Image: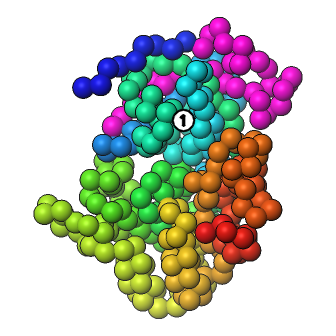
């Protein structure tokens, strides 16, 4: 078992004590505490993060698809999509995969560590505009983390929408995230389809690519998607080409398809230029784009 790292207190950190009115939204850092940590898979954990100041907690709001910058002084800072419901304000959840210095550090800590939070930043999924229509939410791999917030937003206002379908695919069953919530989602009259590329002996569900499930769903819709459906797609950019091409063939307008380029986010300020896509900075103009915009961004996918 890996050692639990000691409590890190940011109370004396000048970075955290700075005020937003002096530096603006990009520089203002909220002092926050990781209140709970839940293992999801061997590589991912769900972190519950609460702003320490009660007034700031009440005033903190975000929209589905936005992200925050999480900082541990002396270790690093990185962007993470907010995975919780937008109704939770200053008590947010972040699904974090262990891939680098900061995330490896976080994988070895438990509740009680204090961190810095900047944000929220970025564009969002327009779930309000989707009211009255059918909503199709498609996630591949870790893309379900960014998709979870719009899923919860739709569930909390379920009566405002028509049919709601979720398609989620991973490489292996061991990589599935948020498995404890699937039954709850289905209780809200949600059609949830899960598929894996490489099934293990205990897997009883379908095997293959997400496009296999989507193809069957399009066939059952019998042309109705063109009139009623809005789509949100999150996952590896290469997946966008195939999934969105199928939706276009089904008659869904590109202006009613939204994707997240969250994998291209870096500093959150558009300063390091690593989020650059053509003439667009994902940190400033994204991460959520309609598919028409993405198709006109050089090297976006």
Query: What is the number of callouts on the image?
Result: 1
Q: Residues within 10 Å of mark 1 (few under 14, many from 20)?
A: many
Give residue 50's quadrant in the image: top right
Relative height, residue 244 to residue 259 (above, below): below
Q: Reply yes or no: does residue 19 show up in magenta.
A: yes
The residue that appears at 70% across and 26% down in the rendered structure is 29
User: Which percent across, then down, holds residue 78?
Assistant: 59, 38
Above-or-below relation of 63 to 38: below
Residue at 69 percent across and 18 percent down: it is 16
Work out whether residue 27 or residue 85 is closer to the camera in this orientation and state it.
27
- Provide the residue span drawn in magenta: 10-39
Q: Could you tell me residue 249's position as x and y percent? A: 56, 89
Image side of residue 197 versus residue 287, left or right:
left
Q: How is the image coloured?
A: rainbow
Residue furthest to the bottom in view is 222
Q: Inspect the magenta stretch and tell me whether residue 38 lies in it.
A: yes
Residue 37 visible within the image? yes
- Quarter of the rendering containing residue 252: bottom right
For disc 1, the marked residue is 92
Residue ID at (26%, 73%): 206
Q: Which quarter of the figure is the N terminus placed in?
A: top left
Q: Secondary structure at mark 1?
A: strand
Against 88, is 292 above or below? below
Using the rendered image of the protein, determine whether residue 189 is visible from the camera's viewpoint: no
Q: Where does the image place residue 106, in percent across and percent down from the top left?
A: 45, 29
- Quarter in which the C terminus is drawn: bottom right
Left or right of 111 on screen, residue 90: right
Residue 174 in percent (x, y) is at 27, 53
The residue sitting at the left extreme is 201
The residue at the point 45 percent across, 42 percent down is 99
Residue furthest toward the top? 12
């Amino acid at each position: 078992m890996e050692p639990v790292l000691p409590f890190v207190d940011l109370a004396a950190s000048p970075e955290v004590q700075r005020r937003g009115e002096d530096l603006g939204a990009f520089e203002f850092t909220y002092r926050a505490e990781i209140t709970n940590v839940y293992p999801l898979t061997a590589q991912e954990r769900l972190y519950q993060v609460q702003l320490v100041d009660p007034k700031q907690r009440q005033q903190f709001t975000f929209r589905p698809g936005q992200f925050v910058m999480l900082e541990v002084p002396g270790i690093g800072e990185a962007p993470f999509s907010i995975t919780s419901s937008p109704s939770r304000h200053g008590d947010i959840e972040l699904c974090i995969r262990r891939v680098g210095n900061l995330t490896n550090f976080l994988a070895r800590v438990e509740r009680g560590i204090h961190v810095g939070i900047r944000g929220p930043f970025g564009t969002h999924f327009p779930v309000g505009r989707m009211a009255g229509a059918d909503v199709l939410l498609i996630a591949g791999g870790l893309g379900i983390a960014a998709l979870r917030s719009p899923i919860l937003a739709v569930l909390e206002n379920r009566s405002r929408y028509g049919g709601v379908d979720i398609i989620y695919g991973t490489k292996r069953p061991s990589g599935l995230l948020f498995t404890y919530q699937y039954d709850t989602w289905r209780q809200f009259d949600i059609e949830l389809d899960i598929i894996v590329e490489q099934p293990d002996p205990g897997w009883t569900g379908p095997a293959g690519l997400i496009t296999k499930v989507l193809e069957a769903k399009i066939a059952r819709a019998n042309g109705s998607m063109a009139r009623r459906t809005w789509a949100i797609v999150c996952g590896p950019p290469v997946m966008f080409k195939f999934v969105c091409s199928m939706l276009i063939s089904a008659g869904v307008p590109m202006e009613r398809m939204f994707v997240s380029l969250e994998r291209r986010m870096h500093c959150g300020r558009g300063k390091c230029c690593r989020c650059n896509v053509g003439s667009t900075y994902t940190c400033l103009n994204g991460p959520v784009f309609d598919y028409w915009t993405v198709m006109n961004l050089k090297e976006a996918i």
